[in-house]
Amino acid sequence: MRIVDALPPVAPTLALLIAAVMGTLAKLERWRRALQLLAIVTAASVTAMCVVLLVHTGDGVEVHWFGGWTPRSGVAGAPSRIHAIGIDFAVDPLGAGMATLAGVLVTAALVFSWRYFEQEAAFFEALMLGFLAAMVAFSFTGDIFDLFVFFELMGVCAYALTAYRVEDRGPIQGALNFAVTNSVGAYLMLAGIGLVYARTGALNMAEIGEALAGRPLDGLVVVSFLIIAVGLMVKASIVPFQFWLADAHAVAPTPVCVLFSGVMVELGLYGVVRVWWSCFAPAFGAHATVVKGVWLGLGISTTLVGALFCIVQHHIKRLLAYSTMAHAGMFLCGIALFTPLGLGAVGVYVLGHGLVKGSLFLGSGLLLHRFRSVSERALFGRGRVLPLAGVLWSIAALALAGLPPFATYAGKGLMEDASIHAGLPWLPAVLVVASALTGGAVLRVGLRVFLGLGHQPPDDATSRHAGFEEETGEEQHTPVTMWVPVAALLAACCAAGLLPALFDGAQTAAARLLDPLAYGHAILAGTPSPVPAVHLESTAPTLFDAGTGAAAAVGAVIVGVVPCAVRVEGRARSAPARWLRRLRHLQSGDVRDYLTWLVLGAGIVGAVLALGAMR
Amino acid sequence: MTQRLRLVLLGTGLSTLLGLLLWGLHGVPPFGHYRGPYGQLVDTVGERERHVTNMVSAVNFDYRGFDTIGEEFILFVAGAGCAVVLRRQGDPAERTEPSGPLGATEATRTVALLGMAPLAVFGIYVVAHGHLTPGGGFQGGCITASAVVLVCLAGRCRTMRRIVPETLADLWDSAGAGGYVLVGLGGLAGGAAFLSNVLPLGTTGHLTSGGTMAVISLAIGLEVTGALLLIVTEFLNQLQRTPQEDA
Amino acid sequence: MDFLPYVVSAWLFGVGVVAMVTARNLISLIMALVVTQSSTYVLLLAIGYVTGAAPPIFASVPSSTPAVDPVVQALTLTDIVVEATVTALLLTFAVRAHQRFGTLDPRELRALRD
């Protein structure tokens, strides 16, 4: 057996093994540094394995059958089919890429937290490694129930990490809201898996795809797809399932927010992509246009709501969370194009966004560590003592808006090309506006905090609200272990944007993923997946990309500078402001409201899907 | 949102969703007539290939053993999560031991103390025979942990902690969870796939049959016992705190 | 009768959700979540049931005996473990919420108004 064949199972289980060891040793205060170092080394090794897999899977799918239980044929009941009896990891470049992103962000977050927590931080590293393992296994698995198991493992780690600062009130409520909404999503997903199993007698995604294909579309298939997708979209913070997102981000420790925004939300969408193309796309056949329409609708609403909520926020972590939501909406739009170029563009965009957002969250952690606040108003002008952080923050803000040569620029540009190819020429406008608004909001924070530009805004009650501040007492010094990850993630985003091979690779990988029956054959029959003869679109940046990139960057600067120059607070009584306030009150902090929206949203989406599919 | 509005929205959404669910369930084979290939395949080949008689365990510990690793770590992480959320906040008053009888009557005490030893033995039996008869590491681990918790229900929480101190529960938790991964890596080290069987399969029906499955069942039993005791201990630590103490 | 177990499953889901949304106490909210999840146990077990078949354990019967589907039972076991752990974790949140807010009424948790 080649070493590379062993990597898919070793990458997640190594993290799990070390997490188990750390569970016992966590209480030994004297070994604190050694344990932290062990966690960083483990996360870095897992990342390295994922990179090797990413490079290696460039020409196919790396399949590993646990226990050596390869599929078999000639079973009573359905003799013509090949059946999986075990669980497989089917690592393709998109999965390996998501796992790599998770590894990079966990490593950066662990380095950042080297001197971040003042209190004893027992179990923090164990939970982070568990989180990493869950994300890697979620990206690799080819089995739908295994997907659910690691979805739950990811969830349990995330809930516990959200509540990490138990000394405050906010984290308890945020974790509760997060855990309850995501659990209901997970149960919907499991019920959907049950329905699929009832029909096909299979849990392997490739086998499900083959079993569902070629039969008339009926209620079972539509409903099982609906509830699995809703479960995953809760994690992906798609409107109207998104309410937990801002609460969890506002209260979770900043290094954890890096993972929530940078990769966990995106993994929800990755799950949707995986399940749709492996299992359901062949069964929907011509009705796939309905799904496409629903996703575009959801994606655009998510983008607009996220961008709107982002610009009116003054709590920096909430602001960044809404920007993530806007981007998740854009990613869903890109996925809904149903083309290799669109999906490949989303892959690049997710990578770029994850790295920039990670850098921004760690930057806000830097502010929090130094000044004990993440309120834009409370921090006004106080960042002048950290000029380097101001420079990094502003660059990251423009990178978030899609400034060349960052990978976000490439991802956005490719997605715009893809939308024009797919006959949606208005979609680039949405992307430009949303990028300008979110990037501009982040830039505005930078200008106010680091330069003290404009008027000092009145300090409001929410910024001093209990639960929004992570620690007590101000710091005079920012350790180098906090600077390095902030800069490194930004540099990595820039480097990724300069790798044209990455764009072509993403498109090829997407093309293979969009051909589910070939994928299924490669996994079940064990034949190496042939490179599909697809026509790849050019991924070289065009003049149009440069134009929209410049438009987004200039827009971001305008959105960033104008609120500093003009007093907008005085307009609070105008009708739009009143409506906006009413809209913001929907984010009530009461988990029962969130559940109501979840159920209502699932019902409406389901009704649209059902009416469309039965026409 | 007012309760009224919430109920109206929920009613609309839930009736639509339930209608959709029933529409989907309509496509499921009638109750009692399921003929799916996966289960039949396991029922047909399980005993021959794995030399075990409990097919549910064959699925859990071998064919779909990787799910069980994830599941075991969900438990492990939840134990760590409970410890994190309920960790002491440095208040010396928090360190008091719940030592009182906890409202245990003479009757509960007698029944609990009588039940303890048989329950512990039964738990270990269920773990050890997981591959043969109904049961396995999860079920047996729960029973064994209950046996220890009975000591506390009998009003002897301090004794319970002496039998299984927190560090021991921690150790079982980690050893069980890590042990399962090591069994999996053992398969890789032997040049085969992760979780491949590396032990002799033995004679079907014997306690020593099933190869690695028996080891995995033991590892899970250890982990479940440890994790559950850890969670119970964390909750017990809260017993003598009042709501005002932390506020 | 052929459809009744599935109706029970859907009903449990609905009842659980209604109980969660109308809960006045975090503990009952968490218990309602458990009820919601139990709908998935009923669903999974009902799917794999075969009338008149034996349990998939061949300790005292030959392995050629018709048996119910073992896979859904294994999935249900996993599901139960997930439920137990998530419940334990949620209950720790409830304990802490009671300490921090002095109440278990979800309407009184007001740390996160936007």
Image (spheres, coloured by chain):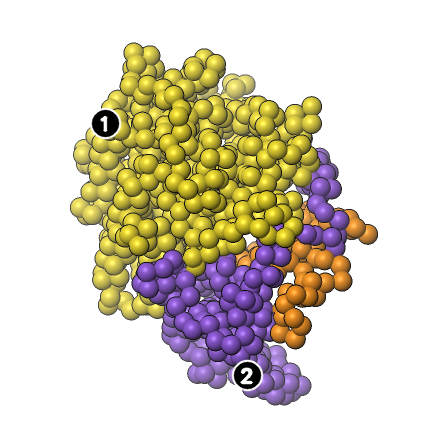
- Residue C92 left/right relative to B190: right
Q: Name the residue at 57% across, 50% down.
A: A74
Residue A276 can be seen, yes or no = yes
Q: Is residue B143 left or right of residue B74?
A: right
Q: Nearer the viewer, residue C12 or B219?
A: B219
Q: Amino acid at mark 2?
A: Val
Q: Which chain is yellow?
A: A
Q: Residue at x 26, y 61 (%)?
A: A35
Which residue, given by chain and number where applicable, does mark 2 sit on? Answer: B121
Where disc 2 sits, the SS reads helix
On the image, the x and y values in percent for residue A324 come to 41, 33
Q: Label 1, on which residue?
A: A498
Frontmost residue, B152 versus A452 = B152
Q: Which chain is orange?
A: C
Q: Quadrant of the C terminus of chain A?
A: top right
Residue drawn at point x = 29 percent, y = 49 percent: A4
